[in-house]
Image (cartoon, rainbow, N blue to C red):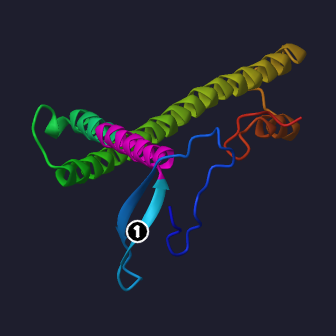
Amino acid sequence: MSAISGYPQVRPVDARIQPQRFILVWLTESNLNGKFFKCFSYSSLLHTLFRRDHHNQLERKRRASIKTSYNDLREAIPSLRGSKASRAVILQRAVEYIEELHKSNRDHTHCVETLRRQNDSLDSRVNFRGYEDHMITYAYNIVLIRATETPQLKSPVLITNSDLNRLIDLLPINNQFIPKQ
């Protein structure tokens, strides 16, 4: 077998080893002005064909996976369930559905925040009512103490400035109903 231009001649190393079978393949290269033969060993050609077949199987599997994913996506969109639709329509409706879900989520979040603010407002009213009761009880106790200190007085008991200051200290600070220490 003579060498083809650019490819050395293949000879068996040992006379006992059978020479491999070679296949000449007609190749066309666009960057070469013309056509030429390339010599492939039978095993390398089989390997190349096996690789191509394996690649084709992987590509079919990938396409089947994409098709399944599109079908799953179509079934996840309420307006497309059970209908035939092109991939472009499926993607377009999926985007619209996702935007609709985002808007609904924002609306629900806004509603939750509004309810939380109303709840906080009601809690502070309840707390303020509790402090009002506390201040009234405190003032009543002061009046009782003054009345018991001077039982002979027939006039109303006056609350002193220090008593008023103690009551003022119980008023809310920055909407926090915690008495001053």
Q: Is residue 10 left or right of residue 107?
A: right
- Where residue 126 sits in the image (x, y, percent)? 57, 26
Answer above or below: position of 91 versus 108.
below
Q: Who's the residue at 68% across and 25% down the image?
A: 136
Q: Who's the residue at 31% across and 38% down the image?
A: 69
66 or 174, nearer to the observer: 66
Q: Is residue 36 left or right of residue 156?
A: left
Residue extent of the magenta highlight: 41-64
User: Is most of the magenta stretch helix, strand or loop?
Assistant: helix
Considering every residue shown, the one lying at the far front of the view is 15
- Determine the image quadrant of residue 11: bottom right
Does residue 63 belong to the magenta stretch?
Answer: yes
- Where residue 111 sits in the image (x, y, percent)? 40, 40
Q: Which residue bears the numbered disc 1?
A: 37
Locate the C terminus by quadrant.
top right
Q: Who's the residue at 20% across and 54% down the image?
A: 88
